[in-house]
Image (cartoon, rainbow, N blue to C red):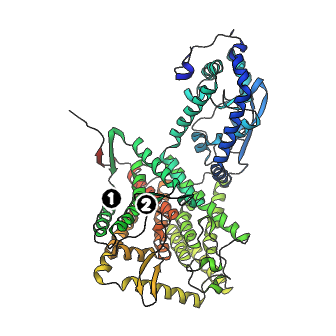
Amino acid sequence: MNRVGADFGPAPAPFADTTPLAGAMPESWENQAPQRRFWQVVVSAVALAVLAPVWLMLALAIKITSRGPVLYRGKRVGLGGKPFEIVKFRTLELDAEKKIGARLLDASDEFYTPIGRYLKRSKLDEIPQLINVIRGDMNLVGPRPVRPIFLATFAREIPGYWRRFSVRPGITGLAQLRGGYHTHPRNKLRYDLLYIRNRSVWLDVKLLLGTFVKVLNKWITFGVLLTLLFLSASLVPGLFHSPFQLEVGGFRISPFEMVLLILAVSVVVKSSPGHQFYIYRCPLNLPIACFLGYALLSAFFASEPVAALQGVAYLAVTGFAMALLIVHQGMNARLLRQVVNVVAVSAAAVAVVGVVEMLVGTHTNGAAMAGLAGISTAARESYPRIASTLGNPVVLSAFLVLGIPLLFTEVMTATSQAKRDFWLVASTIAMIAVFLTQTRAGMLALLVTVGVFLWKVSRRALVLFTMLFVAFMVTLSWFHALRLSPAGVSEVAERVERNVSAVFSEPLPRLLVGVGATQRLGSGVSVNSGVTGKGEVKVANMHLTLVRQFGLVGWGLVMWVFVAVLVTLYRAERKMAEERPRLTLWAIFSSLCGFLISMCDFNAFYNPSIQVFTWGLVGVGVAIVVHMNGRRNGFSILYRFGIHGD
């Protein structure tokens, strides 16, 4: 019995040219063909349904990042040598196939779209081929379809090449599992003919499982994990709460968060050589360690120690751990380009959705914003406010403030005028979206963020932006289009005064050390700030919430983390020679300056989307400093796995 098909061993010797075609298609197999087609169609249909969210995100990313259709449709040669139209996600610029001609793509080729290289490498561009399987053009498993431009050459130079067309082509196959994209067609043919001779339903299942493991191994990279985090946090933030939450050790975790946690652990294990886990020495380590040590110690003296420990664990896992994980994984030019591109695309997509929301009249107003605005409900109804995919104007404005400097970075590093124009339009839409949130703190944060970024990049642009910003604010206020009326500002001042007095009315010992964190993992709600003459007050200010939970000492330690990051980024930016890393460092510096202002308007650390973007950018910035500074990096070994030495 031939075991090569089962064991996927080395490539066999070439098949003799005289092997009869009928011998590759046993009678028993032909009788199974209808059943084989049935289960492949069912599997393809189910896969299309399950992967629907991935379809939508990829289609949106392709449309935003490049001109042209989302899908690529090209001619291929299939069963019996007949041509058919294959469907894939587009990974190349328009008309790139004509320029490439009769050759395979090289790693150095510049024909890829901004996300095309990633789609090609991760095999996500192959997903639409499930449609070809349903239509009957292809099978799930079989020889890969051939471009017509290669067919004549292969048929002339490779004996017996036509025999591979005795079956339908497949999305994957033995040649793809044991070979690769650049494997010579002659060697691919050997694998294809071996598959045709030994094919069965069981062999197809094994090849599919093998392909899944191989692709999954490519997907579980740090760049993919970050991409998944950033895109899901911006476009589908409900995944952090839906469809249900599991109780794990007193914490509420959604299935999506559980999958992310497993992937993160897998990435850490894969990237920890020598059976050891280590942490790079960076400016984050000391302030984070001091805060966690202080918070853990104070939790034991809180009125609810278990809840306080859960609150500390929430901040450690969703914030500090994420930043340190990024630093641990390292940073290079390719990963940096991917991260900046994903963040910029996310900000642009969310802004576009918000503007469309405004145009179609589905913006947030009236009672829907009760408790978030500082003016009466009757007044709020006359001020349209967009919330986009994040569901809250305040959160949306903070999110865009974090992303806008990265959009500017894409503008300044664009390699063509078309890309530069695209990112310039996206940046403009994002800034307009901040105004449409009607969030006062958001507008101030926008002014600070853009001002800081332009101060370093272009003083003339800074003056122009400031003049336009002031003119825009005055004009809209004149027409009562902004929530800046004297009554509104007065009510906001009253709310701030009420929150501050609620927190600072505590006895001095409690004001210094706090009452302990009471948030549970994933809860994302405001905390009780105390009792005043007007009753219990809810604080929607992350600075005051930190003071309430951890006291002035704990708040100071958290601010130490941010100050350490800002100082590190500022110093490193001045020494960085390469343009993209330097601009990215300054963009993150600008984002964090604005974010410290946005924190005054809501409990930022208890919103998953903001947590992901804030600490993700912190980690990226510090990783650039640690890994792209041209010096050898020091690290400390935290744990060794197993026993080493005699």
Do the residues under discs 2 and 1 have CB atoms within 8 angstroms?
A: no
Task: Please tell me whether mark 2 or mark 1 is closer to you in this view.
Answer: 2
Q: Residue at x 47, y 54 (%)?
A: 581
Residue 303: quarter of image: bottom left
Q: Is residue 138 visible?
A: yes
Q: Nearer the viewer, residue 161 or 627?
A: 161
Q: Quadrant of the C terminus?
A: top left
Query: In the drawing, does residue 578 fall left or right of residue 126?
Result: left
Q: What is the quadrant of the N terminus in the image?
A: top right
Residue 55 position in % (x across, y down): 66, 49
Could you say where residue 534 lies in the image, as x and y percent from the top left? 46, 89
Residue, disc 1: 285
Viewer-side residue, 27 vs 67: 27
* Residue type indicated by callout 1: Asn
Q: Residues within 10 Å of mark 2 (few under 14, many from 20)?
A: some
Q: Position of residue 557 (x, y in %)?
A: 33, 69
**Residue indicated by mark 2:** 251
The amino acid marked with disc number 2 is Phe
Residue beneath the point at 70% across and 66% down: 356
